[in-house]
Amino acid sequence: MLKSFLSLFFLARIDLKNSGHDANGLLFEKTDGCKIKMPQWFQQDGTGYQLESSEQSLKLTFRCQGKGTLNIWLRGLDVRDSHRSSIPLYVDYTYFALNGEVLLNKSTPIWHDKPFVVSRAVRDGDEYTMEIRWEPHGCSKAELLEMIEKLLVDHEAHFGVVNLAKL
């Protein structure tokens, strides 16, 4: 259980969407083995994707399907207590490049509700390569212990769709 719990602190979430028309989407060509979800709530005005990885680096290539706006959100995991209130679980993103353009090149703490957002106008067939690196948030031992205690005390706290009581 503890190993599963601690691995959540290494998890990064990247949301991607080609907005503009319901038929818009992305065709992933290289994903470095990250987990890709397509939640129902993210499927209006284009297809939305949630990518999750704990590998601390990710390089992926995708092709745009349809003309629209590519939106990218670098986030942390969506963590909520039993009252559905957000609990900030930071991830320190250290590098982000889109087609070789470096957009982030310093340690930047980010959490689910305060994402780093990039938008680009795209055409059908445009190809993109993203390189992303991150590490667990550089907090003090006291801050980490406080976060763990807060989460473990509330056995109904949820990490995205993961209920702590079920780890």
Image: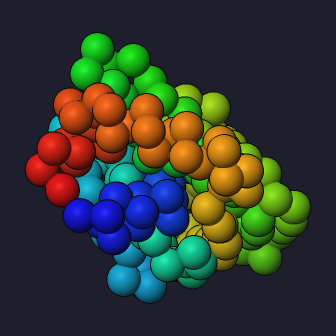
Which residue is drawn at the image coordinates 46% and 71% (left, top)? Answer: 54
Would residue 155 be found to the left or right of residue 53 on screen? left
Percent position (x, y) of residue 70?
56, 49
Percent position (x, y) of residue 11?
46, 61
Q: Is residue 142 visible?
A: yes
Which residue is drawn at the image coordinates 61% and 62% (left, top)? Answer: 136
Would residue 75 be found to the left or right of residue 93 on screen? left
Is 9 or 3 nearer to us in this picture? 3
Residue 163 occupies quadrant: top left
Is 48 or 35 nearer to us in this picture? 35
Percent position (x, y) of residue 124?
48, 61
Percent position (x, y) of residue 128?
60, 71
Is 58 or 21 nearer to us in this picture? 58
Which residue is drawn at the image coordinates 59% and 78% (left, top)? Answer: 57
Which residue is drawn at the image coordinates 55% and 38% (left, top)? Answer: 146
Looking at the image, how many numbered discs can be counted on the residues? 0
- The chosen color scheme is rainbow
Q: Is residue 64 visible?
A: no
Would residue 90 be found to the left or right of residue 140 on screen? left
What quarter of the picture does the N terminus occupy?
bottom left
Is 39 or 2 nearer to us in this picture? 2
Query: Where 16 falls versus 78 (above or below)?
Result: below
Query: Where 135 falls versus 13 (above or below)?
Result: below
What quarter of the picture does the C terminus occupy?
bottom left
Would residue 103 be found to the left or right of residue 52 on screen? right
